[in-house]
Image (cartoon, rainbow, N blue to C red):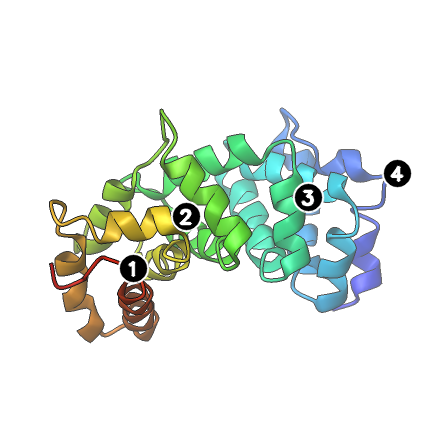
Protein backbone atom coordinates (compact mmCIF):
# COMPACT_ATOMS: atom_id res chain seq x y z
CA UNK A 1 0.00 0.00 0.00
CA UNK A 2 1.23 3.49 -0.86
CA UNK A 3 0.89 4.97 2.61
CA UNK A 4 1.72 8.53 1.57
CA UNK A 5 -1.19 8.50 -0.87
CA UNK A 6 -3.63 7.93 1.99
CA UNK A 7 -2.13 10.35 4.49
CA UNK A 8 -3.66 13.30 2.70
CA UNK A 9 -7.08 12.11 3.93
CA UNK A 10 -6.04 12.92 7.51
CA UNK A 11 -4.01 16.01 6.74
CA UNK A 12 -5.27 18.89 8.88
CA UNK A 13 -6.44 20.69 5.75
CA UNK A 14 -8.65 17.76 4.83
CA UNK A 15 -9.68 16.41 8.22
CA UNK A 16 -13.22 17.74 7.72
CA UNK A 17 -13.73 15.02 5.12
CA UNK A 18 -13.85 12.40 7.85
CA UNK A 19 -16.24 14.35 10.04
CA UNK A 20 -19.77 12.97 10.36
CA UNK A 21 -21.92 14.24 7.54
CA UNK A 22 -25.65 13.86 6.78
CA UNK A 23 -24.61 12.58 3.32
CA UNK A 24 -22.80 9.24 3.93
CA UNK A 25 -21.36 9.09 0.42
CA UNK A 26 -19.25 12.16 1.24
CA UNK A 27 -17.23 10.39 3.94
CA UNK A 28 -17.64 6.65 3.28
CA UNK A 29 -14.65 6.49 0.92
CA UNK A 30 -12.37 8.65 3.11
CA UNK A 31 -13.22 6.39 6.05
CA UNK A 32 -12.25 3.35 3.98
CA UNK A 33 -8.95 5.04 3.13
CA UNK A 34 -8.25 5.76 6.79
CA UNK A 35 -8.94 2.12 7.67
CA UNK A 36 -6.44 1.12 5.00
CA UNK A 37 -3.90 3.58 6.35
CA UNK A 38 -4.21 2.04 9.82
CA UNK A 39 -3.05 -1.31 8.44
CA UNK A 40 0.58 -0.19 8.27
CA UNK A 41 3.01 0.74 11.02
CA UNK A 42 3.77 4.13 9.50
CA UNK A 43 0.06 4.74 8.93
CA UNK A 44 -0.78 4.04 12.57
CA UNK A 45 2.04 6.27 13.71
CA UNK A 46 0.64 9.05 11.53
CA UNK A 47 -2.93 8.63 12.83
CA UNK A 48 -1.71 8.55 16.43
CA UNK A 49 0.47 11.62 15.93
CA UNK A 50 -2.41 14.08 16.40
CA UNK A 51 -5.37 13.81 18.74
CA UNK A 52 -7.82 15.27 16.23
CA UNK A 53 -7.36 12.27 13.94
CA UNK A 54 -8.40 9.80 16.62
CA UNK A 55 -11.29 12.06 17.65
CA UNK A 56 -12.65 12.16 14.10
CA UNK A 57 -12.44 8.37 13.76
CA UNK A 58 -14.26 7.93 17.08
CA UNK A 59 -17.01 10.22 15.82
CA UNK A 60 -17.43 8.04 12.74
CA UNK A 61 -17.49 4.89 14.89
CA UNK A 62 -20.53 6.37 16.67
CA UNK A 63 -22.35 7.03 13.39
CA UNK A 64 -25.53 5.22 12.33
CA UNK A 65 -24.29 4.15 8.87
CA UNK A 66 -23.13 0.53 9.23
CA UNK A 67 -20.45 0.57 6.54
CA UNK A 68 -18.91 3.73 7.94
CA UNK A 69 -18.98 2.37 11.51
CA UNK A 70 -17.45 -0.91 10.33
CA UNK A 71 -14.45 0.82 8.75
CA UNK A 72 -14.01 3.21 11.70
CA UNK A 73 -14.04 0.30 14.17
CA UNK A 74 -11.54 -1.59 11.98
CA UNK A 75 -9.28 1.45 12.04
CA UNK A 76 -9.49 1.73 15.84
CA UNK A 77 -8.74 -1.99 16.23
CA UNK A 78 -5.54 -1.44 14.30
CA UNK A 79 -4.49 1.78 16.04
CA UNK A 80 -5.30 0.33 19.48
CA UNK A 81 -2.88 -2.51 18.76
CA UNK A 82 -0.18 0.03 19.66
CA UNK A 83 0.17 1.62 23.08
CA UNK A 84 0.21 5.09 21.52
CA UNK A 85 -3.13 4.35 19.86
CA UNK A 86 -4.73 3.30 23.14
CA UNK A 87 -3.33 6.38 24.85
CA UNK A 88 -4.74 8.62 22.13
CA UNK A 89 -8.17 6.99 22.44
CA UNK A 90 -8.19 7.30 26.24
CA UNK A 91 -7.21 10.97 26.03
CA UNK A 92 -10.08 11.81 23.71
CA UNK A 93 -12.84 14.02 25.07
CA UNK A 94 -15.21 11.54 23.40
CA UNK A 95 -13.91 8.45 25.18
CA UNK A 96 -16.66 8.12 27.81
CA UNK A 97 -19.42 8.45 25.24
CA UNK A 98 -17.62 6.05 22.92
CA UNK A 99 -16.99 3.34 25.52
CA UNK A 100 -20.62 3.56 26.64
CA UNK A 101 -21.73 3.10 23.04
CA UNK A 102 -19.57 0.09 22.19
CA UNK A 103 -20.20 -1.67 25.51
CA UNK A 104 -23.92 -1.26 24.91
CA UNK A 105 -23.65 -2.47 21.31
CA UNK A 106 -21.52 -5.55 21.92
CA UNK A 107 -24.21 -7.27 24.02
CA UNK A 108 -27.08 -6.45 21.66
CA UNK A 109 -28.59 -9.56 20.13
CA UNK A 110 -28.15 -9.31 16.36
CA UNK A 111 -25.34 -6.74 16.47
CA UNK A 112 -23.49 -7.14 13.16
CA UNK A 113 -20.21 -5.78 14.51
CA UNK A 114 -20.16 -7.57 17.87
CA UNK A 115 -16.98 -9.55 17.16
CA UNK A 116 -15.15 -6.49 15.85
CA UNK A 117 -16.19 -4.48 18.91
CA UNK A 118 -15.08 -7.31 21.21
CA UNK A 119 -11.69 -7.29 19.49
CA UNK A 120 -11.44 -3.53 19.94
CA UNK A 121 -12.33 -3.81 23.64
CA UNK A 122 -9.65 -6.47 23.99
CA UNK A 123 -7.04 -4.16 22.45
CA UNK A 124 -8.07 -1.15 24.54
CA UNK A 125 -7.90 -3.15 27.78
CA UNK A 126 -4.61 -4.92 27.05
CA UNK A 127 -2.67 -2.65 29.40
CA UNK A 128 -3.78 -1.76 32.91
CA UNK A 129 -4.71 1.88 32.20
CA UNK A 130 -7.25 0.85 29.57
CA UNK A 131 -8.50 -2.05 31.67
CA UNK A 132 -9.00 0.23 34.67
CA UNK A 133 -10.92 2.73 32.56
CA UNK A 134 -13.28 0.05 31.26
CA UNK A 135 -13.80 -1.45 34.71
CA UNK A 136 -14.74 2.03 35.93
CA UNK A 137 -17.33 2.33 33.16
CA UNK A 138 -18.72 -1.15 33.86
CA UNK A 139 -19.09 -0.43 37.57
CA UNK A 140 -20.44 3.10 37.31
CA UNK A 141 -23.80 4.04 38.80
CA UNK A 142 -25.57 3.59 35.47
CA UNK A 143 -23.37 1.33 33.34
CA UNK A 144 -24.21 0.76 29.64
CA UNK A 145 -23.44 -2.91 30.23
CA UNK A 146 -22.59 -4.93 33.33
CA UNK A 147 -20.05 -7.67 34.05
CA UNK A 148 -22.98 -10.08 34.39
CA UNK A 149 -24.20 -9.28 30.89
CA UNK A 150 -20.76 -9.80 29.37
CA UNK A 151 -20.37 -13.19 31.05
CA UNK A 152 -23.88 -14.23 30.04
CA UNK A 153 -23.37 -13.23 26.41
CA UNK A 154 -20.04 -15.04 26.17
CA UNK A 155 -21.43 -18.21 27.74
CA UNK A 156 -24.68 -18.44 25.74
CA UNK A 157 -24.16 -20.46 22.58
CA UNK A 158 -26.02 -18.95 19.64
CA UNK A 159 -26.90 -15.73 21.44
CA UNK A 160 -26.00 -13.72 18.37
CA UNK A 161 -25.98 -15.47 14.99
CA UNK A 162 -23.62 -12.79 13.67
CA UNK A 163 -20.90 -13.35 16.28
CA UNK A 164 -19.00 -16.08 18.11
CA UNK A 165 -17.85 -13.73 20.91
CA UNK A 166 -14.50 -15.48 21.31
CA UNK A 167 -12.77 -12.11 21.75
CA UNK A 168 -14.95 -11.27 24.73
CA UNK A 169 -12.78 -13.78 26.59
CA UNK A 170 -9.48 -11.89 26.20
CA UNK A 171 -11.35 -8.67 27.00
CA UNK A 172 -12.54 -10.17 30.27
CA UNK A 173 -9.09 -11.64 30.82
CA UNK A 174 -7.54 -8.19 30.47
CA UNK A 175 -10.01 -6.79 32.99
CA UNK A 176 -8.81 -9.37 35.52
CA UNK A 177 -5.65 -7.24 35.89
CA UNK A 178 -7.85 -4.96 38.02
CA UNK A 179 -8.74 -5.95 41.59
CA UNK A 180 -12.38 -4.86 41.24
CA UNK A 181 -12.81 -7.21 38.29
CA UNK A 182 -11.13 -10.07 40.15
CA UNK A 183 -13.58 -9.56 43.01
CA UNK A 184 -16.42 -10.01 40.53
CA UNK A 185 -14.92 -13.20 39.11
CA UNK A 186 -14.46 -14.59 42.63
CA UNK A 187 -17.94 -13.69 43.88
CA UNK A 188 -19.24 -17.00 45.26
CA UNK A 189 -22.88 -16.03 44.84
CA UNK A 190 -22.48 -15.32 41.13
CA UNK A 191 -20.61 -18.58 40.42
CA UNK A 192 -18.62 -16.90 37.65
CA UNK A 193 -15.58 -19.19 37.86
CA UNK A 194 -17.80 -22.25 37.64
CA UNK A 195 -19.40 -20.84 34.49
CA UNK A 196 -16.03 -20.13 32.92
CA UNK A 197 -14.31 -23.44 33.68
CA UNK A 198 -15.87 -25.41 30.78
CA UNK A 199 -14.32 -22.96 28.32
CA UNK A 200 -10.82 -24.13 29.23
CA UNK A 201 -11.69 -27.01 26.86
CA UNK A 202 -13.28 -24.83 24.16
CA UNK A 203 -12.38 -25.33 20.49
CA UNK A 204 -11.22 -21.71 20.25
CA UNK A 205 -7.60 -21.25 21.35
CA UNK A 206 -8.32 -17.56 21.92
CA UNK A 207 -11.05 -18.38 24.39
CA UNK A 208 -9.14 -21.20 26.11
CA UNK A 209 -6.06 -19.09 26.69
CA UNK A 210 -8.06 -16.12 27.97
CA UNK A 211 -10.07 -18.16 30.46
CA UNK A 212 -6.86 -19.78 31.72
CA UNK A 213 -5.40 -16.30 32.27
CA UNK A 214 -8.45 -15.23 34.27
CA UNK A 215 -8.05 -18.30 36.50
CA UNK A 216 -4.33 -17.61 36.93
CA UNK A 217 -4.88 -13.95 37.84
CA UNK A 218 -7.60 -14.85 40.31
CA UNK A 219 -5.31 -17.40 41.99
CA UNK A 220 -3.07 -14.52 43.08
CA UNK A 221 -5.91 -12.67 44.78
CA UNK A 222 -4.96 -12.54 48.47
CA UNK A 223 -7.47 -14.08 50.86
CA UNK A 224 -9.76 -15.40 48.10
CA UNK A 225 -9.96 -18.81 46.49
CA UNK A 226 -11.31 -19.86 43.08
CA UNK A 227 -12.36 -23.12 44.72
CA UNK A 228 -14.95 -21.41 46.92
Sequence-earlier tag: 4 or 1:
4
Asked if the residue at tag 2 contacts the one at tag 1, i.e. Cβ–Cβ closer than 8 Å, the answer is no
User: Marks 3/2: CA distance?
Assistant: 20 Å
User: Marks 3/4: CA distance?
Assistant: 16 Å
Q: Is residue 99 left or right of residue 14?
A: left
In front of the other: label 3 or label 2? 3
**Is label 4 in a helix, a strand or a loop?**
loop
**The N terminus sits in image quarter:** bottom right
Sequence-earlier tag: 4 or 2:
4
Task: Residue 94: tell me if it is visible.
Answer: yes
Residue at 83% over, 39% down: 14
The residue carrying mark 1 is 222
Sequence-earlier tag: 3 or 4:
4
Residue 169 vertical placement versus 63 (above, below) = below
Residue 35 is situated, as x and y percent measured from the top left of the image, at: 64, 54
Asked if the residue at tag 2 contacts the one at tag 3, i.e. Cβ–Cβ closer than 8 Å, the answer is no
Specify the label residue 37 is tagged with. Answer: none
**Is label 1 in a helix, a strand or a loop?**
loop
**Is label 3 in a helix, a strand or a loop?**
helix
Specify the label residue 113 is tagged with. Answer: 2
The residue carrying mark 4 is 13
In front of the other: label 4 or label 1? 1
Residue 198 is situated, as x and y percent measured from the top left of the image, at: 14, 67
**Is label 2 in a helix, a strand or a loop?**
loop
User: Marks 4/2: CA distance?
Assistant: 31 Å
The residue carrying mark 3 is 54
Residue at 37% over, 46% down: 112
Task: Residue 160: tell me if it is visible.
Answer: no
User: Marks 1/2: CA distance?
Assistant: 38 Å
Residue 121 vertical placement versus 210 (above, below) = above
Amino acid sequence: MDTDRYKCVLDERNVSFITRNPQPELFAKPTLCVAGLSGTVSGRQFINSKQIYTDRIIELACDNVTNVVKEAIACLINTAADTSGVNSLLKSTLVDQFLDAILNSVVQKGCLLADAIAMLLSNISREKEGASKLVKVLTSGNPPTTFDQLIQVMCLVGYNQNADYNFLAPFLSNLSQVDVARSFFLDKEKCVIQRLLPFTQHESAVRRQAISTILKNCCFETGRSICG
